[in-house]
Each structure stands twice: as structure tokens, then as C-alpha cells.
Image: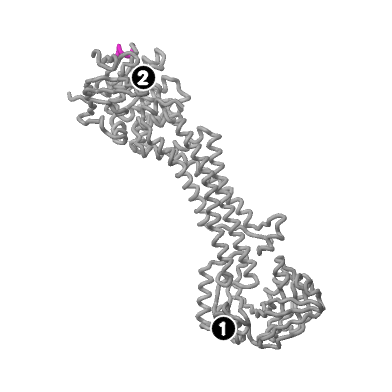
Amino acid sequence: MDPLVTVRGLTKIYRVDGQQTPALRDVDLDITPGEFTAIAGPSGSGKSTLLHLIGGLDHPTAGEVWLQGQRIDRLDHNALAQLRLQNFGFVFQAYNLIPVFTALENAAFVLELRGLPRQQREARARRALADLGIGALAARRPNQLSGGEQQRVAVARALAAEPKLILADEPTANLDGVTGLALIDEMRRLNREQGTTFVIATHDPRLLERVRRTVYLEDGRIAGA
Amino acid sequence: MLVLAWRNIWRQRSRSLGAIMAVGFVVWLGLVYFGLVGAARDGSYVNLTENAGQLQVHTRDYRDARNIRDAVVRDAAALRPRIAATLPDVEVAAALDVPVLLAGADRSRGVLLMGVDQPQALRERFAAAYLAEGRLPAGDDLDGIALGGGLARTLQVQVGDTVYAYAPGTEGTGASAYTVVGVLKFPDPARDASTALLSLPAAQDLAAPGAVSRFELHIGQVRRAPDDAVLMQLRDRLQSALGGAVIVETWREAFPSLSRIEQVMRPVGLVFIGLFFVLAGLLVVNTIYLSVIERTREFGVVIALGARRGRVMRMVVAESLALCGTGAVLGLLLGVLSLARLSQGFTYPGLEKLTAQVGFPSVLYARIEPAEIVTVLGFALATGVLAALMPARSAGRLEPIDAMRFVA
């Protein structure tokens, strides 16, 4: 099967106060459609940086990122925004919901950015919320939801847009054990039943036990897979 | 996007309310200002035209005349019916101005004596407004004269006394004695000290038999200035009926200084309103800019999810427009309420004498043109867009990762 994402020689060096700090060094990676993959490693190993570069949120210092045969690491700001909008779903550690929107509006936001009519986007957002078991919370705002519920809304936001790839950065880091496990199971179920591709940056052992593939990073290099 | 903008502006309630109130106040101020300018415009118009008419008929080149002979319309008796036939719904008055030396028993003063022939209704309105003592000279009265109070005091005469008018070099008797039959009181001291009124026949006997300086045409509408286009149409119709020996002028043409003042008041007002909007705009800039800084992480997420620069900028502009739009609606409501009250008539408390002296009636009526309302609202809209430009540019340039890591 052709890879969905291809990464070759990916290097990212941050320059802080004149000092160069390498975050990723010469990383090669292929992700095929339908994968449920974890990128693991200790803090500072480059997990989030790799996720950001795959998702077109940042530019690499060197190397290439390809999405289904299209090189994306050299695209400009607006082209990358369009690429993210059409292809990627993001789940962040801090949920990052829009506080003035309800759960339904948050879940529908990416579809609104895509310009879908209100009825269509709300129907899809409702379905995504229902899939994650929080359909009854659609009218609540983020400050009326628990951490686990907020993270589910964030997953629903990614899911409603039916992206090719969902990139999740430490999605269980702020959740208690039970809530974290429940969220992991939901994501696995969605991967299994809907074929959604997940790449998850994590060092949560509960999550690592449940993925099909784990890529280990250490000091910005792939240490094992 | 508007829903998001509307909800966002209420996240910092007090700050947004401050900006809304500022824009609302300036919109209200702008509307009331234009309403008062309209009142002043109409007031000047009423003051000027209630006696002098909205259209005037003069002999051609009367402005360049060096003596009374060249400044008058000859054979006025023949011209008057032609005017009445052309514009049958218009009231026509006639006046003859005669520069004279007017003397009492001990004192004399050079004045412009005015012989008038007014329709009855006009004459009654004039008497009700200005007659302080006695009566006006009757239409065929060859001996009676009414003087402004200031002039009567200068000449040291009162009702019943005799005054003497000398008008050398004219075509009439050139000199005559008149009995003071009335004393007038004008708010304008200059007018009070220089007015001397005769009947038209008396003035013609004195200086120019059968002639008038002008016909004054009153077309009604005393509270507000009529549409210039309507007046110009009437002027052209009358001009073509009367021929080239005379010239027909609108009140604007006859009194160009008033038009010039009006032409100045509008741009001056626009400059002031513009300055106030700049001040309100600074408050809006501050509100929007702080809001953008506080929500940098949120903008980072929006960009990460796929919003383009233009979309992010439009989100910021929409918030600014929501602020200014809310302020504008508030200001518009208050402005309309204020103008509705002021359009029923108002005075400047304690300043009635002063306003009368500068040529305004004691009661003014606010009036605003739709174009002026549109102008003020346009200013509010422009403020909303301009105030958002810098914050919108900052938000649009955010890089998603940097923005999501931002700590305010």
C-alpha cells in the first residue's frame, strides 16, 4: 500500500539566543493509511516537533515531508493552511477548544472553515459527538465540560472533518486514568471501524499498550520501531 | 463569523462596553451636530426670507449701480401683474430703498429708508414680530413713518414727532417731512439703529416715482429652506416670462454670504466629527488589540486547524465592526430620539437674545438630511475597519506553533 505520509531526512534545529538546539535529526518515516501509530519517547525527544512537521504546522530545517505524493514542507503559509484544513485533524494536549463556542460549534468549526452549509456541518458534528458518547453535551460550552469531555470534543472536531490523518499530541496527558483509557478506546474503535489514520505523540504507557505500531524517538533520532 | 465576533466582544465586557459607548457617543454627537446645523441653516433662512422673500426681481446689473436711478425697476406697476400671472400662487411684495439723511429736531442720521408694499398676511406677521409701539404706515399713507427703536433714540423722537428726510439727486420731491406713527424693536442692534419704514407710494414720491428696488416673492414654507432645485425652476420660469431687462434671483443668489457660511459649516462639522471618531477609534484599536494579544493561543489553534491569513484577519475586522456597529446603532437610536425632540422646536436657554442678534429666530427646529445620517454611520463603519487593520494584520501573521505556545 502506498504510504499516506513519507518523511525523509527530516531535521529541525531551533535557534534560541544564538544557540542551535536540534530537535529532530535526519528522521525517515512512512505512515500508511489506517495505521494507529504512536510516536513515543521521553520529554524533549522531538515527538511534538515531528508531529508538527508532518501536520504542516512548522517548516523543517532540512529534509522532506510528502503527503500522498505531494511535497508539503516548502508550501507557503496559506497553502499549508489549506492543506491542513483538507487533510489533517489535530488533537492537542490542552484541548484548545474555542471558549465562546458550544461543543457542537467547536466540533463543526473545521467544517465551517471549509465553507460547508450550516445544516450539513452541524449534522456531521452531531454524529461525531454521538460517536464519542457526548452527544448530550452538544449545547455546553467548554467551561461547562470536564477535561475528558473537552478532549472528546477536540477529537470530535478532528473526526467530523473526516480527515486523512489525525495527529494527536499527548491527548491523554491532562486526563485521569479512567478518562484517558476511555478516550484511547474510543480512538481505537474509530480507527478500527472507520479506518481513520491516527498518529499519536505520547509517553503514556496505557496508550502505548494499545497501538499497533510505536516509533521510538530519542534525542531527535528514531531509536526503534 | 459574526456570531463568533459578537460573542468574543463580550468576553471583556467592561472594555467592550467602553468602546461601544465611545462610538455611540460620537455617532450621537454627529447626528445632533448635523441636526443643529440644519436648525441654524433653517433659522437663518427663515430670518432672511420671511421679509425678503425666497425669490427677488431686480433691475439687471443692480449690484453695479452707483445711484438710485440705475438701481431701480422702472414701471413697476406694469411688471407686477406679469409676475402674478406667471407665479399665481406666490405672494408678491415690493420695496424701494432710498438712501436719505433723516433728521429729528436736533439730530440727524444717514439711513437706508425703505418703502414697502406687503400683502396683508405678511404685514401682519411683521407687525406681530417687531412692532413695539404705534402702528405701521398704511399702504397708501404718504406721511407716516415707522422707525427702529435704536434710530428713534438716536434722533430723539417718539410717536407723534416729525422727522425730515433728504434724498438729494433723486427723481422725486427729494425732501419730505413725516410723522412717526410707530416704533419697531429688532433683536439685531444694527437693524434697530438703521430701520426706517414708509409706504411704497411715499418712498416713490420722495425718490423714484413708479419705481421699485425689487419685488420680493414669498412662496411659503417658512420653517425650512425649500429645495434649491424647486426654487431654481421657479426662477427660470419667471426670468423667461419677464425678459432680460430684469434679473430674477433666488435667496441664495441674493444673499451669497449665507450660502458661503453654510458651505463652510458642513466641512468644518465633518472635520470635527472625524476627529471625534479618531479618538473613539483609538479606544476601539486598544480594545481589539488587547483582545488579539489575550487570544493569541486561540488564533494559533484557528490557524492550525486550517484558517488562512485572510480568514483570521476578517475575524478581527468582524469583531471591530461588531463593536462599532453596536455603538453606531446605540448612537443612532439616541440621536434619532434627541432629534425627534429637538425637531419640535428648541431654544438655547439664556442665549435667546444672542441667537436673535446673530440672525436666528427665537425657536429653532433641528433637521437632518438622510445623507448626513449616512455620513455619520459611514464614519462609524470606517472607524471599525481602520481600527482593526493593525490588530488584524498582527493576528494574520501569527505562526500556529508560536501562537499556541504564547503566554500573555
Residue located at (44% from left, 36% from top): B4
Q: Amino acid at mark 2?
A: Pro
Q: Tag 2, which chain?
A: A
- Numbered label tally: 2
Q: Tag 1, which chain?
A: B
Q: Which residues are magenta?
A: A206-210
Q: Residues within 10 Å of mark 1 (few under 14, many from 20)?
A: some
* Residue where numbered disc 1 is placed: B82
- Where disc 2 sits, the SS reads loop
* Quadrant of the rendered image containing residue B292: top left
Q: How is the image coloured?
A: one colour
* Residue where numbered disc 2 is placed: A171
Across and down, in percent, residue B293 comes to: 45, 32
Q: Is residue B356 left or right of residue B72?
A: right
Across and down, in percent, residue B401 comes to: 36, 27
Residue located at (56% from left, 59% from top): B265
Q: Is residue A208 magenta?
A: yes
